[in-house]
Image: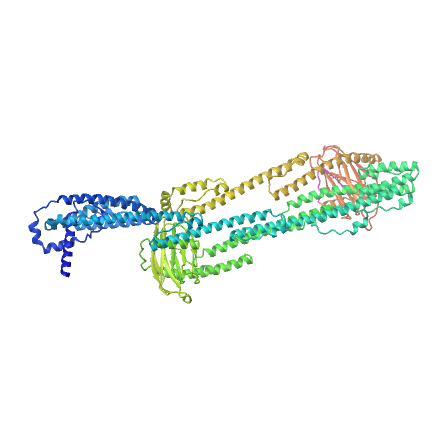
Amino acid sequence: MMVVIIIVATILLMILIWFVFFTNNDMVEDDGLSSIVNFEMPKLFKQEDEKMGFWSGRKSSKKLEESESVKSLRGEMLGKKQNLSSLEQEISDVQDIRNARAAARRELENKRTKCMDMADEVLQLQDKLGIPPDEAFDDNIENMDSADLDLRMVELSHVLRLLRREVDHQDAEKMKARLRRKQDEVTEKRMLQEKEKMDLEEKILKDRLKKMKDEEALRYNIENAKTIEELESIEIKTKDEKELKELNELVEINRARIIKEEEDFKHLQKFEELNESIFNSETVAELELIKIEGVNEKQLEILNNNYSQRHKLLLGRETLAKQLKRYEELIEIIEGFNELEEFDNLVIDGVNARQMKELEQIKSMRRMIVANIMYENLISNSESIAELNDLIITGVSEENEFELIKMRNEKINELEDEKVSALVKKYEEEISGCTSVLEVDNIDFEDVEGDKLEMLVELKNAKRASLVAKIREEGYRENYQKLRDQMKSIDDLDELQGFEIFNVGEHYTIELEKLRLGRVEFLEEQERLRIEQEELEKYNSIRKAIMHAQTSEEIQNVEIEEVNEDQQEELTNLKDEMYVILKEEESIRVYVEKALETDGLAPIEFNEEIENVFLNRFGEYGAKIGDVQFSLIWENNNDLDLIIKTPKDELIHRARKTSSCNGVLDLEMNMKPESKSPLENIVWEGISGEGGEYSIFVWHRKRHGMLRGKDPTKFTVRVANGSNEVVFLSGQTSFGDPLKLISNISVKNIEERGKEIQKQESVYISIKESIENAEGVTQLDEIELVGLSRVRYNELLTYKEEIRKRLEHKEEEDRIIAENKQAEDLLVKINEGSLEELKELVIDGVNEDKKAFLTDLLADKVSDLEMEVERRRRMVVANERMMSALNDAESVGPLEMMEEDLRRDKDFDKRLKRASAQDGDFRISLIWDNFNDLDLIVTAPSGDILHSGNRTTICGGHLDVDMNFKPESKAPVENVFWEKGKAKPGEYKVFVHHFKKHNKRKNQDPTEFSVQMKVGERRGEFKSKLSSGDPVMFVGIMNFDRK
């Protein structure tokens, strides 16, 4: 039985061989059907030919013709082939749709490999046929794109077909004569078998096509499900366990996606609700009732930040409201006081410092008003002259004191004789009408004696004190403005702290001290920033030296100095870390050099399951994606390290996670046994990896035996080289093995890779142009990144954030520029505007700091202009009155000039030099020898009056030295001079006035004085004496003539 089976099998095999080789020239080539033929079979024909040589010799000249049945079957089979070809094409389309992602990455490599194999086969067949080999067939195949490879494969296919046919023809010619007689029988039998096989295959392919279409539709429905209910309603019908498992995994992945999307949406709704509640809270109590929960960590951080800011704002607002309420209560209390004791017993609390100062001022003013009313009532209700004479008026302002004394005197006048009262009233009106101290001092009381005289003298002194107070206040204000301007121009801290504030009064002293304090704080802040900047520059310099050190010996030589304690500690830690990194890198580099001497691993065929494992871990661990990317996975707790050597000879590994060429170790795992499915990832984000050769190494650093870490550990390395090329390399390693070279990978330069990606992704260019043309952040946010490759998405996402920062920066710059321009315009208006324009000026269009500064500046400017207007008005009136008083003094006559030997030239020169007095066309100087305040007054031919209230004239006159406004010297001097070339010819009249007698020990009146007039080298001196209250004294006239 066994012999029969062997004989039958041999006969069938011979028939099959005959059919293949004797029908090859007549049938249409079909790669799908001819793939079942083993093209090594011609060797068998050769052997048979050797055994049956006599048969082939006898039958070589005979030819048999095909029967009609064979021709009919051949035609039917050709139709079946066409149907099969159509079905195969449909299946291929469905398969292409299903494997689009995987096919796009491996298609180019498969074509290149197939093309090279075909080129090698062509060369082999040419050599076999004795044809000179054509090396152009495998030229530049490595650099061809898909279209060029297709053209090359068509050429190679044509050549191969011809070469194979020639080889087959040569082999078949030897066997034709021997096998031709059984051709029809074998052909008919084989065609019948093929027909049955084709029918069966047609049915299988149709079923497979229907199944694949159904499966693809099912996958599409699962991946595009929007809700859990929609996902649950999808019914999965399949008997293939592997396919069922894949679909169930896909369902679970999309279930997790939908749940995450719903959870994110709930978090967003809760975040917006809580954020709105926080910003709508009007009180701290309302805000504290808000419970922050149901959001993710980032939203929680934002809400906590908004909560703290809102809490701080509301707390400050409520505190301010309480202070304001207390402030208003205290004002009402103060306004309700009618007794002086109530003011003295009042305690001011519960308000801030500014409000307390205002309340103290209001309290003081209200107390003076109550005291004034009290004295007015006492005076109005008094009927006794003695009582009125004994009345002491205190606790009121100097102006009100004058009015009360006047009222008291009027009351006394009413009670005294009408004639005397009328005279007293006349003097009172005369005193009241005085606007200068000179006018008051020129008043003489005639025909008044006794109490009336004392009363008028007291009124005169009070009026004089009132005028002196006004003049002093005016001097304080002018000196305050001068000192304020000087202080604003001081930039040296020591000079500012040593700056002397004098002759401005208590109120202006406080203001200047505040200005000094603010200026000191500003300069100290500037100095602190300067020191911090120097420390930062030194810190950055040292940090740069540490970060750029190439060896451990070089980093040891870096000295850390001239930085603050925190920077010292940070740099010391950084230096220690970099030392450890460089030490480890030096040892790793030795291992790398040794590993480079060994052979790497061969790539394995692209596997979609492995690719899915990598992609799942990328998503799970949040790995970054780039067009140049090296990733490592293994399946236990052991610690494997991925190490990359870049074209710049830099190493990227666990100790040095970045390189100068933008590479970064994104993920490093199992330094501690944390995962049984770890991932390590080194990536160049976007399209930033430089071209050149990259070397990949894997090092088994540690076996975690406590958690049953097993060796050898199998691993897989994924290499992404460009947007569509992915290569897998697999191997194994054990603890203690040397550093293992995986492979050397050549990467094209950035420009070439960019061109390849741009050819395939026109959407990328459109979206990038939209991002670049965005005019604002709002327009940028409306751009969606859809329809992009994995590399381009991350690239555009990063680019979009860069553009966002740039637009935000530009918008902020535009806002600041607009604010600065508005501030400059307002500053010009404030500096150059008139009083009426400034009163109507509105400060807006700037930030709060600038607005506060410009508002204060505007208020100061308006105040200065108002005071200047008032000063000029008063000066005009005062000059008129002063000129009247000076004319009265001139009518008395001048003093006599002293002899030359009695002059005090040395005293004048010494005092003037010490006071840094100036000289010009001429000078007029005054000296005396006590603490009293004497004033020098000079009238010019132009009518200008030069005195302490008007220190300069338009004709060049200056009062440059004025002393003893406060009792500061027992050897004072005052000096008036006219600038060179500016003095006008004419009469210059000189007067001296005793302004004030200071209450100093041994400071007596009358005060002797000397006045010296000096023109060139000629001098003239006058001497006399004055007491406080005396009228102004006329000294003499100096005639100035330039001739």
- Residue 914 painted magenta: no
Q: Is residue 875 above or below residue 713?
A: above
Numbered range of the magenta stretch: 916-926
| Visible residue check, residue 431 | yes
Q: Position of residue 469 (x, y in %)?
A: 78, 43
Q: Residue at x 65, y 48 (%)?
A: 317
Q: Position of residue 529 (x, y in %)?
A: 58, 51
Residue 196, image x, y percentages: 21, 49
Give the left or right position of residue 637, taking residue 856 as reference.
left
**Side of 895 relative to 797 (left or right):** right
- Front-most of residues 959 and 216: 216
Examine the structure image and report whether residue 920 is included in the region drawn in magenta: yes
Q: Between residues 986 and 759, which one lies in front from this camera angle?
A: 759
The image quarter in which residue 953 lies: top right
Report whether residue 914 is seen. no
**Which of the 4 quarters of the picture holds residue 714?**
bottom left
Residue most extreme to the bottom: 706
> Which quarter of the figure is the C terminus placed in?
top right
